[in-house]
Amino acid sequence: MNRSAVPPPVTLVLDAAGAWLPARMEAVEERLRQLLEGHGEELAADAGSTLEAGGKRLRPMLVLLSAGPGAGEGAIRAATAIELVHMASLVHDDVLDAAPLRRGRPTVVARSGRPRALAVGDLLFSRAFAELAADGGPERVERLSAASVALALGELAQRRDAFDLSISAGRYLRRCELKTARLFECACLIAQAQEASEKTGALETFGREIGLAFQLLDDVLDVTGPPERTGKARGTDLLDGTVTLPLILARERDASLAEVDLRSLDPAGAEAVCDRIAATGVLEEVRGGARRRVELAKRALELRRALEPERRQLLELVAEGIVERYS
Amino acid sequence: MNRSAVPPPVTLVLDAAGAWLPARMEAVEERLRQLLEGHGEELAADAGSTLEAGGKRLRPMLVLLSAGPGAGEGAIRAATAIELVHMASLVHDDVLDAAPLRRGRPTVVARSGRPRALAVGDLLFSRAFAELAADGGPERVERLSAASVALALGELAQRRDAFDLSISAGRYLRRCELKTARLFECACLIAQAQEASEKTGALETFGREIGLAFQLLDDVLDVTGPPERTGKARGTDLLDGTVTLPLILARERDASLAEVDLRSLDPAGAEAVCDRIAATGVLEEVRGGARRRVELAKRALELRRALEPERRQLLELVAEGIVERYS
């Protein structure tokens, strides 16, 4: 992994951790590369775009940190599998949006067309499960499968609710839980023993809450930009018809926002709606909600004292990094 | 399962088998229904189209027959999982072709749009692995994953070779092996013990050869129709740019066929090319090749005498049904 290309929070954690963590992150990266370059020329051509699709490797890092320095090869496989599911979902998302770029690189769909991007996503999904199975443990396969079913259900919910300005905050949060939080939760749990324990309970809460915080802050960023930093225009969600918490809360404060017709927005109109959302002051409220979730996540680790101090501190750094990056 | 709606070969086998087989096929059908109706309203709306997508349940039948009457719940789960992967691939295929109908019913993409169809396919893939994992046995997950990776690679190969009239018969056959034969092979092996034995060797050959025969005959049907029977216009493959064995062989006999520009074909032009392919007499050659593969499949079961007579006969009926249905 090219350390200099890694965004700050992940770098911070890598610097703070013992040598074991960077070495394992590198092993995951190597494994991803092997898998993507080991399927013949069909996939190799798209391997670069696909490797980039995942981005900062936050989920594999959660797997490795939750598993700890004593974990074996199985943790690397599990981390690889989680990232493959994440990549698959992004490659498929790009198919729908016909997105030209992701992280400044051409997407698979832009490079190679929709049919190939669809097949590449299917392939990554399938590879993810093989990666886990090799290591035994049906409960891991079941966990990852449940998380990836949740991801698809979250996607379905998002499409069903598209362009509907009347959806409630509760409904939005349930969708975020499916679409984002479950895979974070899965990353924290997948390398644990199956039995419920203090530790798994703490990690479950931790994963879910930082996943939700991540999504909330991502949705704030869509409103605030700046595009140089987010890599996409402000209001992209609005143009897709995706109604997120900032708009849901803003519409309570500025009733005229409830009248916006999302279907007729153009990019300039979407930016104007972003400005109106920001003017209501709800963004600080959403950011505050995300920060509270991160605090809750940290407290879960602390209260139960189920993890040794080094790992707890590193997980806390990840959690704080999620907030820092977006503030 | 509505027996009257099942095409002849599957019905024949159900009639010939002891009561155990129809009972288990019904259990698979029930399980598929549960899974598709048990994911809330998001999926329920598309459940009907999705259940239809798989069609004749040939692959689950192969799982159940290969597993035999003594097999437990695990065989039903494995059969369900294989069918879920098959359905997922069809739902995604329909996304690419924006196909309005499959088996006379609206496709998921036609009913609910591309984003939902993409998510439904992803969900079916993920559910398939959960279905297997519940039962233990990492080798099953690995087998199904390998088959579904092959399916995606076959799809990639098909897209890469699209519109290329110069591809060889060998290249075509390798693609069919990835796209079709591996899932048939997997269906025959997935409920077996992991160790290689006479029986698994026989079932492996059987599954691969009938899978190839199935694909060869499917490709002949695209040339011959009739549409009332196949549910699609003649020459649909040509319009998609999919070059199959009938055209590859025909171009050796009628050099002018090598000059056809597939990209500029319209439906009437595609039918005209079908007529020119048929006029070369290659269709009987391809059908003969399929029949030889079915014979080879049957011989594999017979030579090794690894299966008891009832199951061998039923598997033979399935193999013959594949040829009968298309002759």
Image: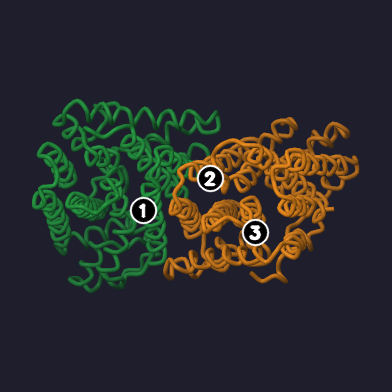
Chain colours: A orange, B green
In the foreground, A239 or A27 = A27
Left or right: A165 as drawn, with respect to B20: right
Q: Which residue is mark 3?
A: A57
Left or right: A186 as drawn, with respect to B91: right
In the foreground, B111 or B280 = B111
Q: Residue A281 falls in which quadrant of the image?
A: top right
In the foreground, A62 or B45 = A62
Q: Which residue is mark 1?
A: B147
Inter-mark Cα distance, 1 to 2: 19 Å
Inter-mark Cα distance, 3 to 2: 17 Å
Q: Quick one: SS at disc 2?
A: helix
Residue A187 locus on image (x, y percent):
61, 48
Whether discs 3 and 2 lie on one chain: the answer is yes
Badge 1: residue crowd in 10 Å (few <14, some 14–19, many ≥20): many
Inter-mark Cα distance, 1 to 3: 28 Å
Residue type pointed to by label 3: Arg
Chain under disc 2: A
Q: Earlier in the sequence, mark 3 or mark 2?
A: 3
In contact (CB < 8 Å): disc 1 and disc 2: no
Chain under disc 1: B
Q: Which residue is mark 2?
A: A144
Residue type pointed to by label 2: Leu
Q: Residue A53 falls in which quadrant of the image?
A: bottom right
